Image: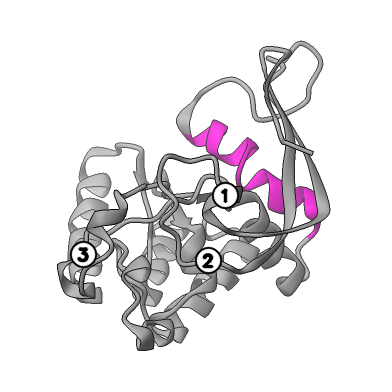
Amino acid sequence: IPALAETVALATILQLARETGARIHIARLSTYEGIAMVRAAKAQGLAVTCDVASTHVHLSENDLISFDSHLHLVPPLRSLRDRDAIREALRDGSIDALCSDHTPVDEDAKQVPFGESEPGASGIELLLPLTLKWAREMGVPLLKAIDLISWKPAQILGVPGGNLAVGSCADICIFDETAEWVVTPKTLASQGDNTPFLNHLMQGRVRYTLIDGHIDFEAPH
């Protein structure tokens, strides 16, 4: 999927936004050019927001040298220039949110040659550590990084929550930002364990998840 596919579609969407005044959200932006277009649209006063997948914050087409089918993603991994543009745009606020792009795939669909495999990767359990990793590498404060996966998405979607204000719904994630763990099928609770980060060391792990004040998830000790 060439970068042109993203920018052509984006140009159409942004022009429609100019004509209609509609609020739009661009999901999983992946190119340097696309980021520049969104940045320009925001400067023009268009009501546009966007997000990127956590995988694309850390990986690029250079990682495809092994043709590992776990790296078969949509949008595809792009150049280092694109990846670095994503990292900087997250820091300067041009990109509004980070998403897991959680797309589990049956193992059988990955145990085939790269071009024949099904695109997608499990990402929900890696969203926190990958966000923290980017923040450490880019010198981004912890609270700003957490905003990208909590408060900002809630704002974009127009749903309550995403903060700890008095009276807010007690949907809370308690995590240990220093906890180290290795990504393996056994350490992932997702039905799919296909991820480009298998056997990678991660730092930062969710300990508890509360929904409406009740413990919904507790990590095994």
Do we see residue 97 in this rendering?
A: no
Which numbered circle lies on residue 186?
1
Say what secondary structure mark 1 lies in. Answer: helix
Count of all numbered marks drawn on residues in the image: 3
The quadrant the N terminus occupies is bottom left
Q: Secondary structure at mark 3?
A: loop
Marks 2 and 1, Cα distance to the nearest angstrom? 13 Å
| Marks 3 and 2 in Cβ contact (< 8 Å) | no
Q: Residues within 10 Å of mark 3 (few under 14, many from 20)?
A: many
Residue 169 in percent (x, y) is at 68, 14
Residue 197 marker: 2
Answer with the quarter of the image where residue 110 lies: bottom left
Q: CA distance from mark 3 to mark 2?
A: 17 Å
Looking at the rendered structure, the kind of residue marked 1 is Lys
Q: Is residue 149 magenta?
A: yes
Query: Which stretch appears magenta?
Result: 141-156
The mark closer to the camera, 3 or 1, is 1
What's the colour scheme?
one colour
Residue drawn at point x = 45 percent, y = 85 percent: 81
Q: Is residue 154 above or below residue 102?
A: above
**Pointers 3 and 1 in contact (CB under 8 A)?**
no
The x, y position of residue 123, in whole percent, is 48, 51
- Most foreground residue, 96 or 62: 62
Q: Which comes sooner in the sequence, label 2 or label 1?
A: 1
Asked whether residue 144 is drawn in magenta, I would say yes
- From where the camera sits, is residue 62 visible? yes
For disc 1, the neighbor class at 10 Å (few under 14, some 14 to 19, many from 20) is few
Q: Position of residue 67 (x, y in %)?
A: 31, 81
Q: Earlier in the sequence, mark 3 or mark 2?
A: 3
Kind of residue sitting beneath label 2 = Phe
Residue with the mark numbered 3: 117
Q: Type of residue at label 3?
A: Ser
